[in-house]
């Protein structure tokens, strides 16, 4: 199939374009958020091709993947596709990556009450909290391109990966880093990490190598769907210390690390793994086994193949 989608979330899109279809990725000269094109820090296969607005207007498209309200409600996709309306003129799926914000009763999805669309959530937690109205919904859990077992744990430090940690502050648990890093040094990676003394703009392979050198992975995020960096850390063979929020208790089994809503418990867990390298290695092996079983790329792509086939058949 020809699948049209914007490059919005680098890690998720990287997994998605590893499928067997042809992926049409919008590109603009400035490569901004509405025309980012192919990834430059992730490795993508050749079947993900860039497409300009002029090309998209007349392109053969079997399914449109929507990921932001403005693509649907703002008419962005319709303009790119030469006036063809997602869900009405071209089969469409809305992928919701985020946990909803606001009061429980107000968590109505932008694509609610659209029986011509399929709303796909990336976690069961998101599906539980968003109100889709009459829009049909599914859950396709994340799948990660396996970076391989690369854990060395040679540095008695914790790796933390947060994009825009300063701006997102309490949402990402950035305010907890000072306390949690009091006894075990933390190394922050991610977009704008340098504003907090961290490291940013590493190619994915380089980031994985640096993460795997750290003894333990810390996931302090209060409110997120399920950080793909957490799943990547588990694939690398890293033990996990994480806040027990949103989907994390489902993703991280007991033998893979420590999950709690109490910062003092997380602090002690970081100290424990920093001091006991063998315990860290064993927990990391359990983490990798769990991630491969539940969040493997093969299962992810099979789930998406079924959905794309089903949606395209309704045209």
Image (tube, rainbow, N blue to C red):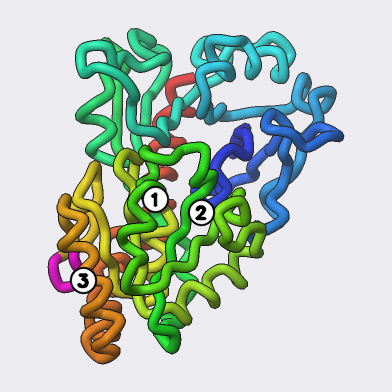
Q: Is residue 104 above or below residue 191?
A: above
Left or right of 245 on screen, residue 288? right
Q: Count residues near mark 3 (Cα–Cα under 10 Å), then give few for <14, some for 14-19, many for 20+.
A: many
Please state which of residues 52 and 166 is positioned toward the viewer in this rendering. 166
Q: Residues under labels 1 and 3: Cα distance?
A: 20 Å
Q: Residues under labels 1 and 2: Cα distance?
A: 14 Å
Q: Earlier in the sequence, mark 1 or mark 3?
A: 1
Identify the residue at horizontal 27%, vertical 72% (top origin).
270
Please state which of residues 61 and 132 is positioned toward the viewer in this rendering. 132
User: Residue under circle 2?
Assistant: 15
> In the image, residue 80 lies at what x, y percent?
72, 19
Identify the magenta region.
Answer: 254-258
Please state which of residues 271 and 100 is positioned toward the viewer in this rendering. 271
Asked if marks 1 and 2 touch (Cβ < 8 Å), the reply is no
Q: Is residue 179 visible?
A: yes
Q: Mark 1, mark 3: which one is toward the viewer? A: 3
Q: Is residue 302 visible?
A: no
User: Residue under circle 3?
Assistant: 269
Asked if marks 2 and 3 touch (Cβ < 8 Å), the reply is no
Q: Quadrant of the N terminus?
A: top right
Residue 42 belongs to the span the image colors magenta = no
> In the image, residue 285 lies at what x, y percent?
28, 80
Q: Residues under labels 2 and 3: Cα distance?
A: 31 Å
Identify the residue at horizontal 76%, vertical 41% (top origin).
50
Q: How many marks?
A: 3
Q: Earlier in the sequence, mark 1 or mark 2?
A: 2
Q: Is residue 213 above or below residue 315?
A: below
User: Residue under circle 1?
Assistant: 227
Q: Is residue 189 above or below residue 56?
A: below
Question: Dot 2 lies on which element?
Answer: helix
């Amino acid at each position: 199939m020809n699948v049209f989608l914007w490059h919005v979330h680098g890690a998720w899109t990287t997994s998605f374009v590893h499928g067997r279809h042809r992926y049409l990725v919008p590109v603009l000269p400035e490569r901004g958020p509405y025309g980012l094109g192919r990834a430059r820090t992730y490795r993508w296969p050749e079947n993900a091709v860039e497409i300009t607005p002029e090309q998209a207007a007349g392109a053969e498209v079997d399914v449109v993947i929507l990921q932001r309200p403005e693509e649907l409600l703002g008419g962005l996709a319709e303009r790119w596709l030469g006036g063809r309306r997602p869900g009405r003129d071209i089969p469409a799926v809305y992928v919701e990556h985020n946990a909803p914000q606001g009061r429980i009763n107000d968590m109505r999805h932008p694509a609610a009450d659209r029986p011509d669309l399929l709303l796909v959530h990336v976690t069961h937690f998101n599906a539980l909290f968003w109100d889709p109205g009459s829009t049909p919904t599914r859950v396709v859990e994340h799948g990660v391109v396996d970076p391989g077992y690369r854990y060395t744990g040679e540095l008695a430090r914790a790796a933390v990966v947060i994009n825009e940690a300063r701006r997102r502050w309490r949402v990402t648990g950035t305010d907890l880093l000072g306390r949690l890093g009091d006894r075990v040094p933390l190394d922050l990676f991610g977009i704008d990490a340098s504003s907090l003394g961290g490291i940013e703009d590493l190619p994915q392979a380089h980031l994985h190598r640096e993460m795997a050198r750290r003894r333990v992975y810390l996931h302090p995020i209060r409110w997120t769907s399920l950080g793909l960096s957490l799943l990547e850390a588990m694939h690398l063979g890293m033990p996990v210390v994480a806040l027990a929020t949103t989907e994390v208790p489902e993703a991280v089994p007991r033998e893979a690390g420590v999950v709690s809503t109490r910062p003092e418990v997380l602090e002690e867990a970081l100290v424990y793994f920093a001091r006991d390298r063998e315990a860290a290695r064993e927990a990391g092996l359990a983490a990798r086994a769990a991630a491969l079983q539940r969040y493997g790329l093969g299962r992810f792509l099979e789930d998406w193949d079924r959905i794309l086939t089903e949606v395209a058949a309704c045209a």
